[in-house]
Image (tube, rainbow, N blue to C red):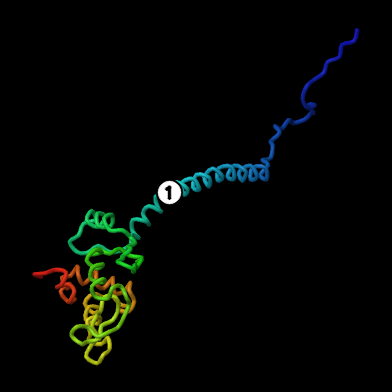
Amino acid sequence: MTLTIRRLGPPIRCGSVRPQVRKPNLRAKAQGRKRGQGERSTPLIEKLLYLLFLSLPFVTLIQTVLARPGSSSPGSSPEDESALTRSIPLETFISGPRWGYSLPFAVKNKATIEKLIQCESGGMNVSRPDSDGIISDGILQFHRGPADTMAGGTWEDFSQASGIRGSPKNPADAIRMTDWAISHGLGPHWTCWRKLSPGS
């Protein structure tokens, strides 16, 4: 009978036995480290993009609030402004018999201006002598100045006071200026004002 014994592991050599020390594989460690950093940075970038995406509505809201058109006048509250905005339409149609004007802005004194236009010019955009002999222009008949020009006339005086530019011959400009004038107590400037408002 033959007995065979097999040994597992490396063969034993005679002489001094030294423990085998494995050299560290630096290249493999560096590659592993890079791989780990790449895996960690991907979720970080995803998190940052996600936070940026979530913050966009707030940034838009802040920009909208800060960029509100118009400026508040001294002594007025935001509630007053919003109530005023709601009560005045953004477009106005002013009309009378056989005439009408569509305006791209709100008019506060619409009914009064319609009566003034009807009385002053019948809705016709004309230049003609007024009852006092002075040439007047436009649908609301603004007086010219002494040299028969706009200089020194009613339009120039109102324009300097209001900051509104344009021409009395342009119906939209004339209506805007008249709306401002009525709101500032200058309605009696028109001859027809006294006819339409007896006792004023």
Q: Quadrant of residue 21?
A: top right
Horizontal side of 98 relative to 141 (left or right) equals right
User: SS at mark 1?
Assistant: helix
Q: Quadrant of residue 186?
A: bottom left
The mark total stands at 1
Front one among 60 and 32: 60
Q: Which residue is mark 1?
A: 55
Q: x, y percentage for residue 162? A: 23, 74
> Of the residues shown, which amino acid type is indicated by label 1?
Ser
Residue at the extreme right of the image, as rendered:
1
Front one among 41 and 71: 71
Horizontal side of 192 relative to 48 (left or right) equals left
Front one among 156 and 5: 156
Residue at 19% across, 64% down: 74
Residue at 30% across, 72% down: 123
Residue at the extreme top of the image, as rendered:
1
Q: x, y percentage for residue 150? A: 27, 86
Q: x, y percentage for residue 57? A: 42, 49
Task: Please say if 49 is above or below 1.
Answer: below
Horizontal side of 147 relative to 47 (left or right) equals left
Q: x, y percentage for residue 139? A: 29, 75
Q: Dividing the image into 4 quarters, which one contains the C terminus?
A: bottom left
Residue at the extreme front of the image, as rendered:
97
